[in-house]
């Protein structure tokens, strides 16, 4: 090894192609990850589109209004933003250039922020009486 963390790039391994089953598994991981991301984007839109439309109709620059009514949607958006690099890297080589080094941290933040936003969205919907 040359002192770097991870596997060394031996010329034998650099030119070696993956077995066909591994290529299929990686392609399937990419498809499943992308489909899951699309479902995560569509779910709040389908569940809360009327509520968000009503909240946006009463827009005002008030701190309580912004925090109480827009925080769930900001948390969902932040969760999806953290999920984007995780979805992008699914099925890719962990030693690759575009693979995020802190992928597990991104996945953790994505799931926590998204779930917190969804739970707060349900709570806002219950208070508004749209459930």
Image: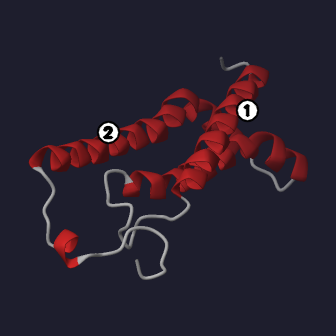
Residue that appears at 38% across and 68% down:
7
In this figure, which residue is indicated by the disc labeled 1?
120
Residue at the extreme front? 1
Toward the viewer: 55 or 42? 42
Count neighbours of disc 1 (C-alpha within 10 A) and say few if under 14, some if 14 to 19, many if 20 or more: many
- The answer to which of marks 1 and 2 sits earlier in the sequence is 2
Residue 53 vertical position relative to residue 123 in the rendered view, above or below: below
Q: Is residue 54 visible?
A: no
- Image spot of residue 128 (x, y percent): 75, 24
Which quadrant of the figure contains the C terminus?
Answer: top right
Toward the viewer: 91 or 78? 91
Report the Cα–Cα distance between label 1 and label 2. 27 Å
Q: Secondary structure at mark 2?
A: helix
Residue 63 vertical position relative to residue 130 in the rendered view, above or below: below
- Image spot of residue 72 (x, y percent): 70, 40
Q: Secondary structure at mark 1?
A: helix
- Quarter of the image holding residue 31? top left
Q: Nearer the viewer, mark 1 or mark 2?
A: 2
- Quarter of the image holding residue 55? top right
Q: Which mark is residue 32?
A: 2
Query: Does residue 4 appear to the left or right of 71 in the view shown?
Result: left
Q: Is residue 26 visible?
A: yes
Residue that appears at 60% across and 53% down:
105
Residue that appears at 49% across and 32% down:
43
Which quadrant of the figure contains the N terminus?
Answer: bottom left
Toward the viewer: 49 or 41? 41
Count of marks placed on residues:
2
Residue at the extreme bottom? 2
Residue 91 vertical position relative to residue 93 in the rendered view, above or below: above
């Amino acid at each position: 090894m040359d002192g770097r963390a991870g596997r060394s790039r031996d010329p034998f391994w650099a030119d070696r192609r993956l077995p066909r089953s591994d290529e299929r598994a990686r392609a399937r991981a990419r498809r499943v990850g992308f489909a899951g991301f699309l479902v995560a984007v569509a779910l709040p839109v389908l569940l809360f589109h009327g509520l968000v439309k009503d909240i946006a109709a009463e827009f005002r620059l008030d701190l309580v209004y912004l925090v109480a009514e827009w925080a769930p949607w900001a948390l969902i958006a932040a969760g999806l933003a953290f999920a984007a690099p995780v979805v992008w890297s699914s099925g890719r080589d962990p030693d690759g250039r575009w693979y995020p080094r802190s992928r597990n941290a991104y996945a953790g933040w994505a799931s926590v922020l998204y779930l917190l936003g969804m739970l707060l969205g349900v709570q806002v919907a219950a208070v508004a009486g749209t459930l």
